[in-house]
Amino acid sequence: MTVAQLDAAPVEGVAHVFPLPPAPGSVSAVRRRVRTVLGGWNLPTGAADDVLLVVSELVTNALVHARPPATLRLWRVPAQGGGAVRVEVTDQGPAAPPGPAAAPDPDEHGRGLGIVTALSARCGVLAHTGGTSRWAEVLAG
């Protein structure tokens, strides 16, 4: 797979890579950049909105719970008789937090991965020597 600049043509197998600085405003800045990429891919509005929400949830999860540095990769893949957008966030942390986790406040936290699962055709976690990648594939119409 090759890496593309934001102005490159969207081709299956070409990834757009976004570093995720652990700073306030990172999620909204990444969403704006991803929206630019998706606009060039001419996705249906609903699919683009789903991808943006998945990006927001996975990026937020990495910035709040993982070890930096984190990176977002975005590319198109074939799926279920059409296409999908693969969203993958890689960080330096383990696949699961060590020890028992404190119960999140259901009114404010803890629903992100459930949202990702609901919006994705497929999703998962891959642990590797470089850290952990959380990924999702959103059908693109």
Image (cartoon, helix red, strand yellow):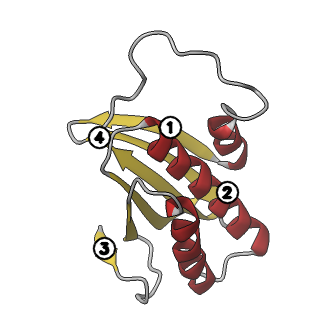
Mark found first going from the N terminus, 4 or 3: 3
* Gap between marks 2 and 4 measured at Cα: 23 Å
Q: Which residue is mark 2?
A: 53
Mark found first going from the N terminus, 2 or 4: 2
Q: Which mark identifies residue 92?
A: 4
Q: Amino acid at mark 4?
A: Gln
Q: Mark 4 or mark 1, which is nearer to you?
A: 4
Q: Which residue is mark 1?
A: 124
Name the residue: 30% across, 50% down. Answer: 69
Q: Amino acid at mark 1?
A: Gly
Left or right of 48 on screen, residue 25: left
Mark 2 Cα shell of 10 Å, populated few (<14), some (14-19), many (≥20)? some
Mark found first going from the N terminus, 3 or 1: 3
Extreme residue toward the top, this view: 100
Label 1: element kind: strand
Nearer the observer, 116 or 27: 27
* Gap between marks 3 and 1 measured at Cα: 22 Å
Nearer the observer, 26 or 83: 26
Q: Position of residue 133 (x, y in %)?
A: 39, 43
* Gap between marks 2 and 1 measured at Cα: 16 Å
Residue 88 to residue 5: above or below: above
Q: Mark 3 or mark 2, which is nearer to you?
A: 2
**Camera sees residue 141:** no
Q: Position of residue 108 (x, y in %)?
A: 73, 35
**Camera sees residue 105:** yes
* Gap between marks 3 and 2 measured at Cα: 23 Å
Name the residue: 65% across, 48% down. Answer: 120
Left or right of 80 on screen, residue 87: left
